[in-house]
Amino acid sequence: PDADPAKQADQESSGDLGIAKTEAPVVKSTEETDELTQALNWIQNAWQMAEQGDIDSAIALLETGRETLPEQHELQYHLALMLATERADAVSARKEIDALLAKAPNQPDALFLSGELYEAAGEAENALDQWETLADFDADYPDLAYRIGNLLFAQFPERQYDAATWLK
């Protein structure tokens, strides 16, 4: 029997990524999916690879996704997140987040992660700037009020009243 052309194309392209065919992303043909679905599939597969301990392949998949689908900002966000959490590579994560925010300055997840990276680096003012920018258009972002309140309380004694407002 003839092989399914979409499956064959996916298998052939997975070889270019240096990923074993059993770990290749499940991506349907262009007619069946759009770029967002493809990006979400790559993200899901990358995190599955990371959970199985194959961090290098997971990062390579996200890097390929970022290059292949540059308008799908979630790929670059998850690349930065994976670099920060799975590799503990704050420098590379910062580079990815900065590049993403240059393209999409109001990407909520990127702003939140950027604040976390700044906070971890001891740059409280920059962290606060990122989180306050996020709060300007998404004040209900999960954990944002708590993080801003705690940062203000711990790092900005002159803003204790503001901290209390965020923490209530």
Image (spheres, rainbow, N blue to C red):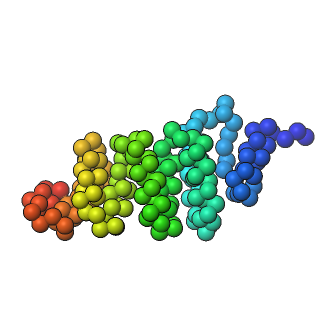
Q: Looking at the image, can residue 61 be seen?
A: yes
Residue at left 57%, top 52%? 62
Towards the viewer: 163 or 155 = 155
Q: Looking at the image, can residue 48 be seen?
A: no
Q: Where's residue 162, x and y in %? A: 12, 57
In the rendered view, does 153 fall on the left or right side of 144? Answer: left
Instruction: Identify whether 4 is placed above or below 109.
Output: above
Q: Where's residue 124, x and y in %? A: 25, 63
**Res. 160 image quadrant:** bottom left
Residue at left 58%, top 45%? 67
**Res. 3 image quadrant:** top right
Instruction: Identify whether 165 is placed above or below 89.
Output: above
Question: Where's the N terminus, which quadrant?
Answer: top right
Q: Where's residue 10, x and y in %? A: 73, 44
Q: Where's residue 38, x and y in %? A: 60, 42
Question: Where's the C terminus, which quadrant?
Answer: bottom left
Instruction: Identify whether 55 is placed above or below 33.
Output: below
In the rendered view, does 108 fall on the left or right side of 6? Answer: left
In the rendered view, does 32 fall on the left or right side of 143? Answer: right
Disc tally is: 0
Residue at left 66%, top 43%? 27
Residue at left 50%, top 49%? 76
Question: Which residue is situated farthest in the top direction here?
Answer: 31
